[in-house]
Image (cartoon, rainbow, N blue to C red):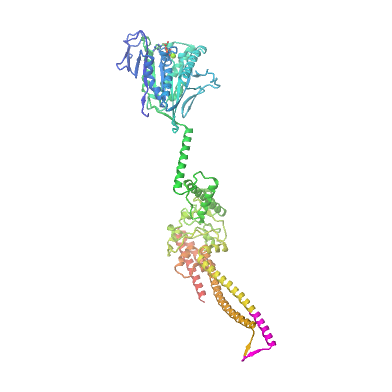
Amino acid sequence: MGTRKKVHAFVRVKPTDNFPHEMIRYGDDNKSIDILLKKDTRRGVVNNQQTDWSFKLDGVLHDASQDLVYETVAKDVVSQALDGYNGTIMCYGQTGAGKTYTMTGATENYKHRGILPRALQQVFRMIEERTTHAITVRVSYLEIYNESLFDLLSTLPYVGPSATPMTIVENPQGVFIKGLSVHLTSQEEDAFSLLFEGETNRVIASHTMNKNSSRSHCIFTIYVESHSRTLSDEKYITSKINLVDLAGSERLGKTGSEGRVLKEATYINKSLSFLEQAIIALGDQKRDHIPFRQCKLTHALKDSLGGNCNMVLVTNIYGEAAQLEETLSSLRFASRMKLVTTEPAINEKYDAERMVKNLEKELALLKQELAIHDSLANRTLVNYDPMDEVQIAEINSQVRRYLEGTLDEIDIINLRQIQEVFNQFRVVLSQQEQEIESALRRKYTLIDKNDFAAISAVQKAGLADVNGHLVGEPDGQGFGLGVIPFSFKPGKKIKSKKTFKDQLSIPVRKEGASSPLSTKELDISPSKTQLILPPRDGDVKDMRDRETSSTEPFPSDSPKEELRPPRPSTPPSKPVAFEDFKNERGSEINRIFKENKSILNERRKRASETTQRINAIKQEIDTTKEALNVQKALREKQGEYENKGLMIIDEEEFLLILKLKDLKKQYRAEYQDLRDLRAEIQYCQHLVDQCRHRLLTEFDIWYNESFFIPEDLQVALKSGCSIRPGMVPINRVVSLGEDDQDKFSQLQQTMLPEGPESVSFYNAKVKTEQKHNYLKAITGLQQVNKK
Ligand code: ADP
Ligand code: MG
């Protein structure tokens, strides 16, 4: 397999009584044949023509028995067909030279049977020997006459006449004849019957249809399919053996025929000459196109000539001087054929059904193996089946919770689940992308950066500069977000007042390129789009520039600086923000506040309980006093007893006195407790109030810092001042004095024409002014606080 092989070409010489030994000579090795012509031969060969020829072949079969011919010519080809190699054996030669005799043989004499029956015999014998394989054999018998296809086995009762003419069809598996009956034969005898049926039809057709059988090509094909009996082997091999009895190769000139015969001769020559052309092309290594489709014969044999098959040619010649010219012609064809190389290869196929069964078996085995591993690893109930919708939905929810932070980790169960987790990450990500984009679209007008028409429209409207950068775009280096002020027109005076809307532009941080919030991270819109804020009064161009920012005197990369997410476009409502604040920055104050409050409540509860108890005691004291008074009055009425100055009282009155004394003691103790509690309550109340105040103050500062105060100002001022930026009333932070504004716009008008390099200069100018104003505001505040 895979090695190139030459076509084997043999010559079979038809026995004759007058063999011209002086004209036809065989080589000693019986592999060459020389033709020698005398110049004065009556064939009229012109003097200056070549007179000697020598042909190298694979063997000369002279006086060879049918047996020997089969052994030499066909045995190996048939044998290899059972191993999956296609094989083709062709007989070529002039009419009467013995092609049919070689191929079919004398059907009436077993000893003289030809290659066809012998090949069938060999196939069935080999099948019997190959018990390891289930081999099926099919046969077909095709005749090509005048470029028409005939099925020589169509007369069989179960075939039935075909409605449409047969056609040659090519598919990836090879070439086949559509409409040609192919017959499954399980034993030698059936195969022989089919062969005889075909031979009979060949003869009958030549009579009834007035066909000259020597003008037709006959192709008997044996199809072999071999499956291993070992069930696990899903591979199987197929092959076919084409046994071709070609039409007579004699040339038109010689027959001298006219009319119908002439037409036939033309066809014969045509198809044989096309065969010869194909053979020449196959023999030429440089040719990549082989003209197979020029006629039915070569087309039908397309995958059986050259290519991946074993090919053998038998050239039948007369061993007679009178036929030398045709003999020469036939030998030339044979020597051309010998140049053709083929690369025989096994036709291996896969039995899909068997393959699926084997894979299912393998799968079941692996599942068992997994189950064993799971139980060894103490993992129970792990399911390896594909996920259903419910499971996928559960994973989606896990991923969402994980992203929100409500789920710490996603347990790993198996590979399928891991893959689904990744899958759901992708799903969630793309949903979020869409949500963000649609949120942006609701608020902004998005322009494709490549949409030049839209950009020029925006330019006309004064919303973008000539380079297509949006006016509010910080540096035009791929920043996707920019703020377009409503009032801005090129050359128009720019107000430097910073309003909340200013924060809508990307919050540019001091660190510039080294900022943890890099441009990329901030650019949440698709990189090709830009953002334009719907125009609003009072909006101001963002003058901050990353370059300038990096020259800020106060580096902000201090470790205390916490990473803050980009600001929202609108600040949340205070109640909402307060909830956030309590969970984040204000959490510690809030915790203390809540603690104090609960202590306060606890003390209040105790105080109220104590009060209740005091009231109860007081009531009891009153009733006891009353009872005692009753006793006293009774005693006075009955007359008092005095003993040595001591009042004599009865036991009942004595007990009441004792009780009253005890109650008063209790009363005093409880009252003391209540007083202590009240003091504690007062103290706690004070603490709670303080905490609440602190909480609200801190919240306000945080709220201002988070949503209103420009970040660069915050950072710039942080290290230099004890008062935090958020403490300053917002209206004082964000405004410049009228004088400053005027000064700035004057500066700008005079300096801006100097070019874009001057922008950083102006930015620095604005910042310094802002900072100055801010410090003034803070100093004022500190003085107010001192008073
Ligand atoms: P072809 O098919 O090439 O036209 P055939 O095979 O029909 O020629 O042969 C013509 C005649 O010659 C037949 O009667 C055949 O039996 C006989 N014949 C051809 N070759 C041999 C041979 N090698 N031995 C005996 N008879 C032969
Ligand atoms: Mg014949």
Question: Image quadrant of residue 683?
Answer: bottom right
Q: Which quadrant of the figure shows ligand 1? A: top left
Where is residue 770? Give x, y as percent.
Answer: 49, 66
Q: Residue at x 49, y 70 (%)?
A: 778
Q: Nearer the viewer, residue 28 or 104?
A: 104
Q: Residue at x 57, y 53 (%)?
A: 442
Q: Residue furthest left?
A: 28
Q: Nearer the viewer, residue 352 or 364?
A: 364
Q: Residue furthest right?
A: 637
Q: Residue at x 44, y 48 (%)?
A: 377
Where is residue 12? Give x, y as percent.
Answer: 37, 15
Q: Residue at x 66, y 89 (%)?
A: 640
Is residue 750 depicted above or below 786 in this figure?
Answer: above
On whether residue 47 falls in the magenta region, the answer is no
Instruction: Answer left or right for 632 relative to 745.
Output: right
Where is residue 372? Give x, y as percent.
Answer: 45, 44
On whether residue 626 falls in the magenta region, the answer is yes
Q: Is residue 73 visible?
A: yes
Is residue 215 depicted above or below 305 in this figure?
Answer: above
Q: Is residue 540 visible?
A: no
Quadrant of the rendering where the N terminus is positioned: top left
**Tag count:** 0
Residue bounds of the magenta highlight: 621-645
